[in-house]
Image: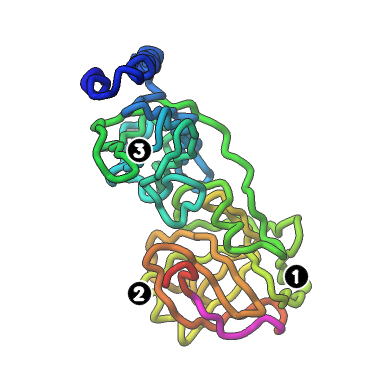
Amino acid sequence: MKSFCSILAAAFAASCFAGAASAQGLLDRLQGSKDAHVVKDTEFRMIGCELTPDRSAICRLEVTNNYRDKKIEISHGIKLQDDLGDEYPVQQGGFGTNTSRPKWDQVAIADSTYQLTVIAANLSSRATSVRAVVFPRILVRTPQGQALGYTDQVVFAKPKMMTPEEPAVEMAAATTPAAAEQSSPAPKPAQEQKQPKTPAKKAVQVSTAAEPSFPTGDYWIVLGLWDYDAVDGQQLPANGFVLRPVSGSNLGVRWSGHLELKNHQSLAPRVRTLWPVSVNPAQRKVCANYPDYPTYEAYIDMPGAGADGTYHVSNCNSG
């Protein structure tokens, strides 16, 4: 900081050293902290973590950029460690709330605070808390790209454990793909398991008891969809999907029914996970907004007959 100040005109020297003193004060305040770190006047503070019923861990941080505009870059390879000592890769999250498209860099405006989320999936059923989150490198640049400095192996130890938040999105008419993506994030879903057949209490309910007609309007509804692989997909032309009235949640999103292959129970056993997707019955579209998600056509058997048909399934954000 002193070398930087020395090149400034005398008229600005006082303000420069005042900034240096403020930065040093920030460092002193956070010295020895396990839940906050400073990289080039940029404060990273751990708010807390939660374990979701689907065995995902979600940790939320606040990033406060002080004094001037900067560009913050977080290297890939973030690890989350549970209380048993097992490590899990963080594959979702980033700056902002759109966790379906991970974003690990941010142009940060001076004296502004940003939300940062890290999500790890498939934690051991014996894990009860998060022991640490480790960032391999945090790099800070000027907005023009000049490196200002970096810190390696940034560790947030023993974060505060919080109660999982209530899902922000229900399966309901007028739900849009954007709303689903901006809901409170929660990591990768749980392993395949039988879920209680409890229909949602709000808005649109899907139930085979009275076999109601599925709503056919031009709006978006959030449903679950299994992460079928290429082998599973070979069953799609002959069997198609069917809507099962089974509630569930993942990534902070709740649904009242999920799509699955009609012969799902006869598929070769493997770990499968339900993910939220957005369905528009009128447009015959299913938006699975996940990186590299394939595009294909699928016949879906909905309750009743009005919404039955061939749907276009794809990542609606790509292209």
Distance, label 1 to label 2, CA atoms, is 33 Å
Asked where in the image residue 133 lies, by quadrant, the reply is top left
In this view of the protein, can residue 32 be seen by the observer? no
Asked where in the image residue 198 lies, by quadrant, the reply is bottom right
Asked if the magenta segment contains residue 312, the reply would be yes
- Is residue 281 left or right of 277 when viewed as pictured? right
Q: Provide the residue designation for mark 3.
A: 80
Which comes before the other along the chain, label 1 or label 2?
Answer: 1
Q: Nearer the viewer, residue 36 or 149?
A: 149
Q: Is residue 187 above or below residue 116?
A: below
Cβ atoms under marks 1 and 2 closer than 8 Å:
no
| Numbered mark located on residue 209 in the image | 1
**What amino acid is found at the position of numbered circle 1 in the picture?**
Ala
Asked where in the image residue 30 lies, by quadrant, the reply is top left
Asked if the magenta segment contains residue 154, the reply would be no
Which comes before the other along the chain, label 3 or label 1?
Answer: 3
Task: Say which element carries label 3.
Answer: strand
Q: Is residue 96 above or below residue 213?
A: above
Distance, label 3 to label 1, CA atoms, is 43 Å
| Numbered mark located on residue 230 in the image | 2
Residue at 47%, 52% in the rendered image? 99
The 10 Å Cα crowd at callout 1, few under 14, some 14 to 19, many 20 or more, is few
Residue at 70%, 62% in the rendered image? 172
